[in-house]
């Protein structure tokens, strides 16, 4: 069996790739409990602000559908900025 | 210890379950946010007793913080609510996630690989718990494929500062967990 990776062996890219995979699948939340409206996710993607989006940001760490939607919005925004 | 009534409300005790005192101003703020706290906590955890304990713990933490930073009094309910939400989410993240056997044996599901990703999962959970709003958003941007320069622009700082801010939390977590 392969040795588990220790912290010092974990590269940044690998760490965030893992994080993305983990957050996008580990918290299915099929009933969409506690999910913010799409407009709040959009607003946070465009102008992240602690006072306005603190709770939404926390929610993203335990809701895969919202996390995936936020990733989509960030990708769209990145695309728009590079065009 | 909090007194949990039959309804969806409860009373906050001036001392949390670990015996830490709660400042009267924080106690008043806690009473004020109970409806929102219960609403949020019930959606995620569904257990009023756990929610009451978490709110007391958050109140005790904020009471201690208030002693060192009296300016918190300006938005005590807001600060307390954020502290409470963090605690709820932390408990939620630590709840057992059931994984089907087929997922567990498929190496393509990185987070479900029980051996290779064990330390990464522990590190990542602790990393999220330690991040403030900006650092967490920077991590999200990184996960969405942004460069450090782009992340820096979003948050009004240099690429180097952005990278160092995230790296600092990562190193702190690694140091704390010694992995």
Image (spheres, rainbow, N blue to C red):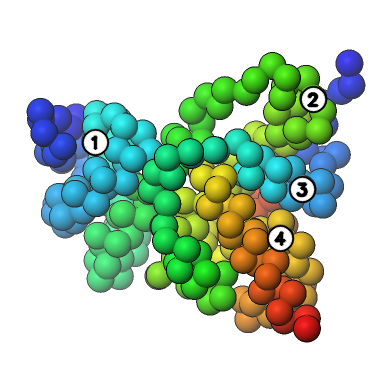
**Circle nearer the N terminus (1, 2):** 1
Instruction: Count numbered badges in the picture.
Output: 4
Element carrying mark 1: helix
**Dot 1 corresponds to which residue?**
B52
Element carrying mark 4: loop
For disc 4, the chain is B
Q: Residue at x 71, y 43 (%)?
A: A21
The CA span between labels 1 and 2 is 40 Å
Q: Residue at x 40, y 70 (%)?
A: A51
**Dot 4 corresponds to which residue?**
B144
**Circle nearer the N terminus (4, 2):** 2
Name the one closer to the observer, B76 or B47.
B47
Residue B57 at what x, y percent from top left? 31, 40
**Which of the labelled discs sits on residue A17, or is there none?**
3
**Which of the labelled discs sits on residue B106, or is there none?**
2
Asked whether residue B161 is in view, the answer is no
The CA span between labels 3 and 1 is 36 Å
For disc 1, the chain is B
Element carrying mark 2: loop
């Amino acid at each position: 069996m392969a040795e588990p990776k220790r912290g010092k062996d974990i590269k940044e890219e690998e760490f965030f790739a893992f994080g993305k995979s983990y957050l996008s699948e580990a918290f299915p939340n099929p009933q969409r409990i506690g999910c913010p409206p799409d407009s709040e996710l959009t607003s946070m993607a465009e102008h992240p602000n602690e006072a306005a989006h603190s709770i939404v940001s926390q929610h993203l760490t335990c809701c895969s559908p919202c996390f995936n939607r936020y990733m989509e919005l960030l990708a769209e925004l990145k695309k728009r900025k590079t065009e | 210890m909090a007194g949990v009534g039959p309804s969806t409300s409860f009373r906050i005790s001036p001392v949390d379950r670990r015996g830490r005192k709660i400042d009267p101003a924080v106690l008043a703020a806690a009473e004020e946010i109970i409806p929102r706290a219960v609403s949020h906590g019930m959606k995620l955890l569904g257990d009023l007793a756990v929610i009451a304990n978490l709110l007391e713990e958050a109140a005790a933490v904020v009471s201690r913080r208030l002693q060192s930073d009296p300016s918190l009094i300006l938005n005590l309910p807001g600060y307390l609510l954020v502290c409470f939400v963090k605690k709820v989410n932390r408990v939620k993240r630590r709840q057992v996630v059931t994984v089907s056997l087929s997922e567990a044996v498929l190496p393509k599901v990185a987070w479900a690989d029980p051996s290779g990703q064990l330390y990464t999962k522990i590190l990542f959970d602790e990393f999220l718990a330690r991040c403030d709003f900006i650092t967490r958003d920077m991590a999200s941007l990184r996960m969405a494929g942004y460069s450090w320069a782009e992340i820096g622009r979003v948050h009004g700082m240099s690429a180097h500062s952005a990278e160092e801010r995230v790296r600092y939390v990562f190193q702190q977590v690694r140091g704390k967990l010694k992995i």
